[in-house]
Image (cartoon, grey):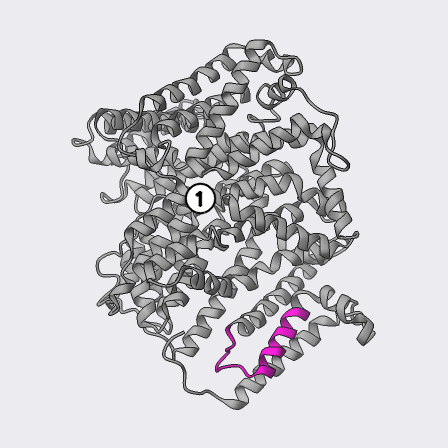
Amino acid sequence: MTGTRDGAPAAGVTKDAPAVADTSAEPDLKVIEQYIEEEEGAFNRVSGFVGSAITAVAVAVSLFHIYAAFDIVPAHILRPVHVACVLFLIFLLFPVTRSMRDRIRWWDWVLAFASVGVIVYILMQGEDFGDRAIMPEPMDEFVGIVLILLLLEGTRRATGIIMPFVAVVFILYALFGNHLGEPWTHRGYTLDRLVGHLYMTLEGIFGPTVDVSSSLIILFTIFGAILQVSGAGKFFIDFSFAAMGGKRNSAGRAVVLSSFLLGGPSGSGVATTVTIGTVAYPLLAKAGYEKNAAGGLLSAGGLGAIISPPVLGAAAFLIAEFLKISYFDVILMATIPTILYYLAIWVMVEVDASKHGGGAEIMVEKGALWRLFAGYWFHFGSLISIIAFLLLGFSPVLAVFWATMLAVGASAIRSDSALVPPVIVVATIAVGLVLSLMGLGDSNVLALTTFVALVVTAAVGLLMPQVAPVSARLVQALRDGTTGVLNVAAICATAGIIVGVVTLTGLAQRFADIIIGYAQGSLLLTTIYTAAIVWIVGLAVPVTASYIMCAVIAAPALIKLGVPDYAAHMFIFYYAVLSEVSPPTALSPFAAAAITGGNPYITTLQCWKYTMPAFLVPFVFVIDPLGVGLLLQLPEGRTWVDVVEITLTVAAGIIAFAFAFQQWMIRKNTALETALFWAAGLLLVFPAVVEAVLAPLIGLKLTSEIPGLGIAWSVPLGLALGAAAVVLQLLRGREDRPATA
């Protein structure tokens, strides 16, 4: 979620890190920053009193949302206030054009305070404001139009033109769609009716997307920023390189492990790629990785930040909201696909090592791993605490609240990571114990106690940053937590326009009928069309926006054909994530290419090599009746044994695909071996597809179970073909390897 970056290796962890001889491979910092800005937005360069004032506002926004996590703030207050804060900061931090980043213009101030003004008007109307949504008063209509215009401009500044443009298209559809022919036509809606629906109800701008943004996404962003500022990101990288150092293929393995660990505090594909890449690329180059191959591995690892529990990307919170399930359920559903994703990358990294004769080792000092863990073990505790609190029955909001408080408190264990003075931590614990002994220490009182300690520390950091550098770090984390959510929050608010129009006009069902009609009722074709739609939409907008739009217009088609709603939404989520590495907006590979000096488009193709096997997996839990087992859901009439079976079967297929994509196992594949690996992968991962193509020729239902064994014919056949390819490789032994990947 937050794009805060911190990536220098700790002293003593890596030793004699090799320099890259080719100076063209030196990172282009300006280009890297450009790609980061494409994802996170280009900030105004503000300093002095104005900069301090904006920092104070950002800190106050974080503290307000932290307070709302444990004390009930009604939705009709929390959501508008959230949007007001977001728009206010966007107009001050994001310039109207990149060329105007030198200072805040007068019109930026006007727009910022206008954003606050329209929200104040809404709050002054009281709880019955929505009762007149169908027939709004003239002033209501005027304020609503102003809010929509401000939101469109704010989103344009923070994320680019595409999202506002799409929102305008949906608005025009609502106003004039009644003039279209079947199946697109609808009853027609006047401007006042549309505006009233979009901002006077909880089904438009202030609907489910802003609900998630105001209650969950910003809290997780604050949590990620706190981990980063306290040094967790740097520690995870150092730990990964120390853990993998001195072993075969140290560099490749370290990239895989660090990308997984860094996904929690980062949540950003580009930021993770850049953070790891600046440290790891010289080591990858020494290990034999060609520039584009190294960039492909780095960006594939960065992509994992968006799909890796316990945080996942912002879209995961929206899945929980749309499906009305707990966030913990989403984490569980993402667990096996994430394991399969990293399995694919890990296997390919091991194949890379085989190509390079084992790869170069990372030299580490003796005992470096233990020293790192002994000194900074609490970062692991902070990261997994969210899962622990969820398992204890806490709501997602309270889970991230207490995880954040724990991370802040634990940071005080070391002076170089502390966000609060140790005396504050001790005093807070003492007060909590006293209140508990007095019988007053319920969860709300204890939460208020920790919150007050946080406020006091932040105030000291704001007023005396030079005198209290520890408190100043907390200020930085709270500021980054707010600024890191601005672009996502703007997307969520603008997406509310799209969602509102879809619910008002019934567009989702019409679109579903169109997709199914084109697919002639075929689930496979409908799934392929849906994947193409999500992918195309994702080329133009960020992951969160892509998921929201496709979830409301494309998911109903899959659901209508019998796909469980959770499987349909997870399918769309993963293909929305795939857009992160797809041109022309392949930000992670492009950023990686800037680090390695490689070609951006070739780097993107190399990234696909590492990621594509795993991105075939979403098709499994849509078109295979047993596929929902990969989401840790029991298929109808099945047991957990079937879940284990489908997981192991797909894992074996993913490994076969990896060997096929790499054209190598322990040596370069022959054409026959590659064909066998491809066939094995298809039979193990997509038996229904193979059956549909070959059934007329072979007269055997590959998906039918073998009598007495309870497994499909495709499983032993696929394993046999894969084993045959492996045997052929072993019989031929090893051969000389190329100098580069």
Q: State the residue lying farthest toward the left.
A: 467
Relative vertical location of residue 235 with respect to residue 413 in this rendering, above or below: below
Relative vertical location of residue 229 with respect to residue 352 in this rendering, above or below: above
Q: Position of residue 126 (x, y in %)?
A: 55, 11
User: Residue 556's quadrant in the figure?
Assistant: top right
For the record, the magenta segment spans 662-683
Q: Is the magenta stretch mostly helix, strand or loop?
A: helix
Mark 1 residue type: Ser
Q: What residue is drawn where x is 70% and y is 37%?
A: 508
Q: Position of residue 291 (x, y in %)?
A: 36, 67
Q: Where is residue 28 in the image (x, y as percent from the top left)?
A: 29, 55
| In the foreground, 503 or 95 | 95
Circle 1 Cα neighbour tier, 10 Å, few/some/many (<14 / 14–19 / ≥20): many
Image quarter hosting the N terminus: top left
Report whether 148 appears left or right of 593: right
Q: Report which residue position mark 1 lands on.
A: 385
Report whether 309 appears left or right of 282: right
Image quarter hosting the C terminus: bottom left
Badge 1 element: helix
Report whether 540 appears left or right of 254: right
Does the image show residue 486? no
